[in-house]
Amino acid sequence: MAENRQADPATQVTVDEMILDYLVYMAVKAVLQDRKAERSRTQPLPQQSRADLHLEMVDAFLLVFKANHPTYQAQLGMRFRLRLLQHTTLSMRRISAWPTTPTLPSLKEIRCQNQERASVWLSHRHSSLTSLPPTSLALQIYDTALPLPKTTLLRNRTYISQVLGAPHTPTPFYGLARCPSLLDNLPGFMAVSAAQVAMINSSTVTKRWMSLAARYMMQSALEQYLVYGERGSEKLLQAFAWGFDAYLVADEGSDEWETNAVFWDDDAEVEGWEEIRSAHLEAFVPGHGIPLEVHLEDLVLRNPIDEFEDDMIAFLEAFLGCQPRPILTQMEEADLEGLSSLQTESLRSRVGSMC
């Protein structure tokens, strides 16, 4: 008579969660390693990169996982790791076309949602002021001096592609409507930061994070005008529409709710944020008599995008390391926390194919 070896459901979800955690962790590492290899230009990536293989494994296993555990609710740690993978993939693979690149209809939907969020935030912020900030009046030049000529946009796209190590392709991609922009990915940066704050139960963010966030906003706005050919101050104000919104309507635990909470500290907006945000926004106002194009190009020279991306890669690597390594990674490396090498090897033998 055959023995019933069906796995216990409670045990199976735990095992599957361990596998998913391992696959997601390895995929984040692979995406970052591929991006650094592109930047270093030490060797060309193969037609199918290492990250592609890891991302395909995550996608395939997620389908099986959801089918086997339809009511599964991810805990904070898993939610954070999945959010980190999503943002890392979108932000590190945006200047070239990949199988993971969102479709143009998806990007258009994302852009509408992002613009709507910013418009609501700005309306709430302005409603609490007796008059518009001086910066708003000074930005009227963005309506008259833009967009930049197509030849200038093409030159900027070529320059940034070279600086960021984008592989040469016969079909243009970077800077076109179907290419994800920094502004498209900015809410993802906020969401993954908020998820990390919620996971470690921190009450506030650091000045270092605030500086990086403000630089992300600055680079997002510069790219809109110098690469995508936008005009008017709308994209600039959208990029900087971040801070505590006392009038926000959002479900507790949602991305919007958690991101808003990042900017709140006890009984006021987190100290220092408004000053940092305003300083970076005001940097977009050209001095008297200076043409806007000259001023924006000077901002680019003083804020190199490759240095910004270096800091973003370090930021994402730090986020990947802020959690303990997945159990299966520890077993694979024979370095299971709390166990000796001999005990780890014994456990690996018992688990067998799980490694």
Image: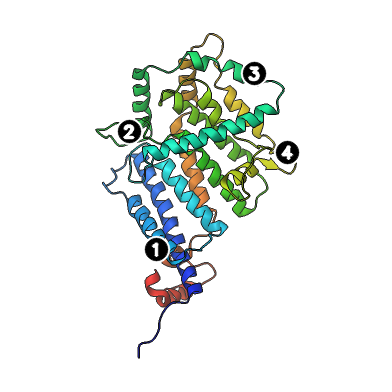
Which circle marks residue 134 in the picture?
3
Q: Which mark is residue 263?
A: none
Q: Nearer the viewer, residue 334 or 155?
A: 155
Residue 173's label in the rendered image is 2
Say what amino acid the circle numbered 2 marks: Phe
Question: Could you tell whether 260 is left or right of 97 in the image?
Answer: right
How far is disc 4 from disc 1 in space, using C-alphas?
A: 45 Å
Residue at x-position 52% and y-position 58%: 78
In the depicted structure, whether residue 161 falls above or below residue 35: above
**Mark 1 nearby-residue class (10 Å; few <14, some 14–19, many ≥20):** few
Q: Earlier in the sequence, mark 3 or mark 4?
A: 3
Tell me the residue that label 4 is attached to.
Answer: 268
Q: Is residue 241 visible?
A: no
Q: Which residue is mark 1?
A: 64
* Farthest-out residue, left: 170
Element type where label 2 sits in the image: loop
CA distance separating discs 2 and 4: 43 Å
Of mark 1 and mark 2, the one earlier in the sequence is 1
User: Which is nearer the N-term, disc 1 or disc 3?
Assistant: 1
Q: Position of residue 196 (x, y in %)?
A: 57, 50
Q: In the rendered view, does 211 fall on the left or right side of 8? A: right
The alpha-carbon separation of the residues under discs 3 and 2 comes to 37 Å
**Relative depth, front residue between 127 and 37:** 127
Q: Dividing the picture into quarters, in which one does residue 130 lie?
A: top right
Secondary structure beneath dot 4 equals strand
The quadrant of the rendering that contains the C terminus is bottom left
Between label 1 and label 3, give the one nearer the viewer.
1
Which residue type carries mark 4?
Ala
Q: Position of residue 329 (x, y in %)?
A: 44, 63
